[in-house]
Image (spheres, rainbow, N blue to C red):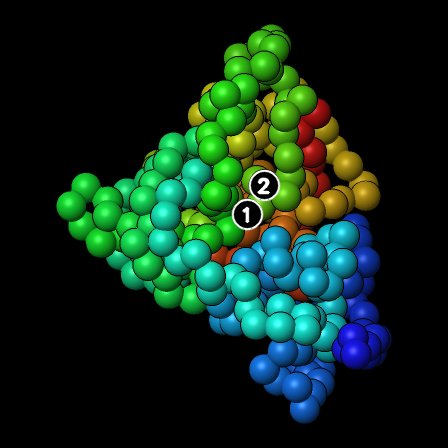
């Protein structure tokens, strides 16, 4: 018999600058279930990739099993986290050849984003998987044991028509490319790989990022070739347009944080959180409801 998931209402929806909250981070509204091994109740600060890692399943499996049309989760929402009606098929075929689907996939020293980055693999490159730990595959990377997220590889052969996501883009004035192949969810998933990378003034690589360098790196690895500039430059850039109805994948800007005018930015990953390179925490995920960020909020912009 199929398990009927209990719908959970968010009791205390909050109002964020410019958008309505779908998940209230830090509200502490947790729900319990007797089927903890197959059903997961969403808690504050959780997102699909984190839940998948905890249960050893992929984001795509969570989407399929729960018929999800968005990655935005609500606190108290119940998710199926094991193969309905049978064993978890995610644990099969733990070895073999896989093809990278991300623009650039980090190789880490351990199974999780808390481990250091030891290298990266480009889109459509193939790797030989030698084992599996939860939602992480084990590979040999330049003579070292490395780990890659199972969410960004496939068993399918490399595509001959999409070896570079920007091949079919057209060049516009200002040195940017068209965004016909730009996918916000792919960009968000790509950006989340780098949580934990340290802050580095002027940094634009996984060795270290500053806030605008992180934006430059993420955009240029997701089909948008755009020159390196500072936050003020992105705020006024012609490839960005101001929006009043922000969505995941839009850019959030702040002002007067450490200097006058536009001074910090990040990428919205859902209706309440954004990912950014913080000078104190490196690449991290923060809540727009935080008092500091609310006081310094400037606006939202979107890639044209």
* 184 or 26, nearer to the observer: 184
Identify the image quadrant of the N terminus: bottom right
Are there few (<14), some (14-19), or many (20+) residues within 10 Å of tag 2?
A: some
Is 14 placed above or below 168 here? below
Q: Which residue is drawn at 76% across and 58% down?
A: 67
Q: Residue furthest left?
A: 143
Q: Position of residue 105 (x, y in %)?
A: 41, 42
**Label placed on residue 186:** 2
Q: Residue at x 81, y 58 (%)?
A: 20
Q: Where is residue 151 in the image (x, y as percent from the top left)?
A: 51, 51
* 199 or 257, nearer to the observer: 199
**Label placed on residue 189:** 1
Disc 2 on helix, strand or loop? helix
Q: Residue at x 70, y 25 (%)?
A: 304
Say whether marks 1 and 2 touch (CB < 8 Å).
yes
* 95 or 34, nearer to the observer: 95
Q: How many discs appear?
A: 2
């Amino acid at each position: 018999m199929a398990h009927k998931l209990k719908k959970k209402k968010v009791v205390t929806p909050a109002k964020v600058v410019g958008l309505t909250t779908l998940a209230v981070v830090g509200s502490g509204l947790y729900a319990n279930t007797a089927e903890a091994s197959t059903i997961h109740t969403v808690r504050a600060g959780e997102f699909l990739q984190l839940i998948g890692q905890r249960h050893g399943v992929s984001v795509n499996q969570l989407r399929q099993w729960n018929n999800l049309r968005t990655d935005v989760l609500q606190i108290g929402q119940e998710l199926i986290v094991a193969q309905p009606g049978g064993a978890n098929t995610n644990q099969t075929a733990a070895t073999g050849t896989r093809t990278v689907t991300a623009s650039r996939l980090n190789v880490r020293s351990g199974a999780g984003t808390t481990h250091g980055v030891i290298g990266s693999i480009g889109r459509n490159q193939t790797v030989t998987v030698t084992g599996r730990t939860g939602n992480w595959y084990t590979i040999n990377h330049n003579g070292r044991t490395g780990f890659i997220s199972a969410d960004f590889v496939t068993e399918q052969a490399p595509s001959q028509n999409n070896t570079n996501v920007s091949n079919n883009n057209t060049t516009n004035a200002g040195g940017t490319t068209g965004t016909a192949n730009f996918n916000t969810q792919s960009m968000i998933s790509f950006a989340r790989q780098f949580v934990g990378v340290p802050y580095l003034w002027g940094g634009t690589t996984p060795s270290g990022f500053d806030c605008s360098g992180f934006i430059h790196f993420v955009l240029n690895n997701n089909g948008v070739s755009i020159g390196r500039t500072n936050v003020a430059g992105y705020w006024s850039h012609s490839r960005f347009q101001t929006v009043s109805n922000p969505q995941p994948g839009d850019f959030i800007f702040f002002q007067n944080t450490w200097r006058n005018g536009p001074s910090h930015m990040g990428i919205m990953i859902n209706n309440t959180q954004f990912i950014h390179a913080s000078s104190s925490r490196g690449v991290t995920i923060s809540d727009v409801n935080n008092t500091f960020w609310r006081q310094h909020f400037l606006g939202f912009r979107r890639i044209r």
